[in-house]
Image (tube, rainbow, N blue to C red):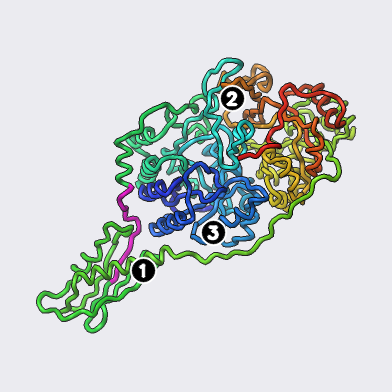
Amino acid sequence: MNPRSAPLELLAPAGSPEALRAGVQAGADAVYLGYGAFNARRNAKNFSEEELAAAVSYCHLRGVKVYLTLNTLVSDRELRGAVDTARRGAELGVDAILVQDLGVAGLLRAALPGTALHASTQMTLHDLEGVRMAADLGMTRAVLSRELSRDDIAHICAHSPIEIEVFVHGALCMCYSGQCFFSSVIGGRSGNRGLCAQPCRLPYGWGEKKEGYPLSLKDMSLAAHLRELADMGVACAKIEGRMKRPEYVWVVTRVYAAALREGRDPTAEEMEQLRQAFSRQGFTSGYYEDRPGRDMFGVRQDTQPPQALFAQARAACQKETPRVGVTFTVEAAPGVPLAGTVSDGTHRAEVMGPVPEAARTRPLTAGEVEEQMAKTGGTPFRCDGVDARVAPGLSVPRAALNALRREALEELTALRTALPAVEYRPVSYPTRGRGGGEAPALVFSLRRWDQWSRRLMDFSPARVDLPLEELAARPADTRALVEAGVPLAAVLPRIAREGERPELAAQLGCVRQAGVDQALVGNLGLLAPAREAGFRLRGDFGLEVFNSCTLAELRRLGLESATASFELRLAQIRDLNKVLPTEVIVYGRLPLMITENCIHAVREGCRRDRGPCSKGVELVDRRGARFPVLRAPGCRSEIFNGDVLFLADRPEDYLRCGGAFARLLFTTEDAAACAAAAERYARPGRGDWTPQRPTRGLYYRDVE
């Protein structure tokens, strides 16, 4: 499966050329950086084309790999630019490209077949089946969600067909990466587009009181678990921080590099240096140790930068650390030019010098040759040995030996930094789709059994969705609805970790036996289990359909329909080439976050023994906006927008989208409100029912 013998790779962030140099000089084995407009840290300085070329050359000379981040969602109009960015990065020598967007992954797989692709953490890969799916999509490495425990990681590593990368230090998002819509829905700046405004770092309260920071987690640190990660078979330990200053990158990378190199845990002094560089009231390893809860939360306190530590970092970045071990061979024989070779174990450079003369006084010795060849100071090279083959009675000037060394290292430099031959195959881009056509069929997505009523069937829905665990809890009622002709579908959880799989499999079997044959799937890891259980597959919003190529990828994977991202404008949805029947969410509280930490439990302890924890809880921000917090499968929390997406008074707009289905997403509504909303959409232009706080969502404004 995934046996490993190579040492754990240390991957450092490079938000700027200065940060890249800091990471390399501190001991990173690889760096990741952004170039162009399609990376998840667009507010970082990032790299111009000239800077990227220089960065790759700088890193490859020193034996450091470079990974290009192309890990955002991309619209149809941007697809060509994304492929061009990836192609240019490959031509400049990047070692791999990180991607989030399924459509982009498919295009790059076809356009750049020889280029390694890594699945970004934005793909929300948190189980073995998701990693296997990423491998099927052409990924050579998967970056796991930060929320996983050591047992989860170990299980995935033991069976994964591709390399596994794990975050070991830096900021923790409250929401699973790739599933956060808080910043975009509230402020129009999308984390899936690289411009997250970090609303999780703001104060919130319960009811009217601003109690603190219930969405702000401490930074993670797994510095004490590096040997364990290596033993599991993790390929790469990743440090977060492309928005951080170069001094931070140097401090953190140096501590982790020393611990890996020396096979030990960081010292107390080193942990204090990590804290000084940046922390939010300390660090946490709560997810890794499977101990979520209050201790994981913290905020950044106003402190002065550690002047002495950062001054040390700046000084160290200006020095060259000799990282590349080389061996020399020098032959001095009468009547033939001085011959020198240098090898780094992979590359070999050969150079020639002057013809040695007969010695008039003191002849050249092997020791003198070794002494001159070993003078590699100020370069990335470290002399590990010299084989000096010197015939007796010859004389060679020191200047000639120094020139031989310099020329040999220059030739070796050229070999190490040579650009690769890149295979590029032209690809076709999607043509513009059409809107209009048949009116979309209605889909009602319920969250609870008590939202169901017979009245809903008066509006002839194409599908009625209920969560898998709700259907499995009442199999007799489920079967009764199926036998009554209700087109039920099971909504699978967006997050389901390894330990939840047995219960999930039992639920799938129970619901399928009750007659339900459709499943709404919102993560890659549940496509195969749902298919194997006999369900027809439909794509939920968690699969992030942002372009036509993603629709094509999902059709290739066997899905019968997919849900368009609600971060798209209606006009963009209209223009999608709908090679797969497409669903548009037209009503409901939009999901903002799904969190591994149960917000209820963090606030007041687990409430399962005191009744359901999914009712009557709201977060309130500093402006008074309210956000319902509901229980999600696995005792997680899901935060929803307080305003309700409402388009029933403008049916001509969403009808022009050409969607096959118009979906009403019910959350906190009771059965009467569900039926009233359904009637308003089923009979456009009739009635005047509206929700209390309606919003148009993002459908009429551009998301950054």
Mark 3–mark 2 distance (CA, rounded to whole Å): 44 Å
Q: Label 2: which residue?
A: 599
Q: Residue at x 84, y 33 (%)?
A: 479
Instruction: Say the numbered circle drawn on residue 554.
Output: none
Q: Residues within 10 Å of mark 3 (few under 14, many from 20)?
A: some
On the rendered structure, is 134 left or right of 444?
left
Which of the pair 432/541 is nearer the observer?
A: 432
| Residue in the foreground of this view, choosing between 459 and 366 | 459
In percent of width and height, residue 261 lies at 36, 48
Asked if residue 373 lies left or right of residue 323, the reply is: left
Eyeballing the image, is 420 above or below 288?
below
The residue type indicated by label 1 comes to: Glu
* CA distance separating discs 2 and 1: 59 Å
Q: Residue at x 85, y 32 (%)?
A: 684
**What amino acid type should be assigned to the residue bearing mark 3?**
Arg
Q: Residue 573: x, y in percent?
A: 73, 44
In which quarter of the view is residue 457 placed? top right
The residue indicated by pointer 1 is 411
- Is residue 25 shown in magenta? no
Q: Nearer the viewer, mark 1 or mark 3?
A: 3
Q: Magenta segment, which residues?
A: 317-329
Outermost residue, bottom side: 335
- Describe the element under mark 2 as helix, strand or loop: helix
Distance between mark 1 and mark 3 Cα atoms:
25 Å
Q: Which residue is mark 3?
A: 88
Residue 325 covered by magenta stretch? yes
Q: Earlier in the sequence, mark 2 or mark 1?
A: 1
Q: Mark 1 falls on what kind of element?
A: helix
Give x and y (percent) for residue 207: 61, 16
Residue 2 vs residue 365: left or right? Answer: right
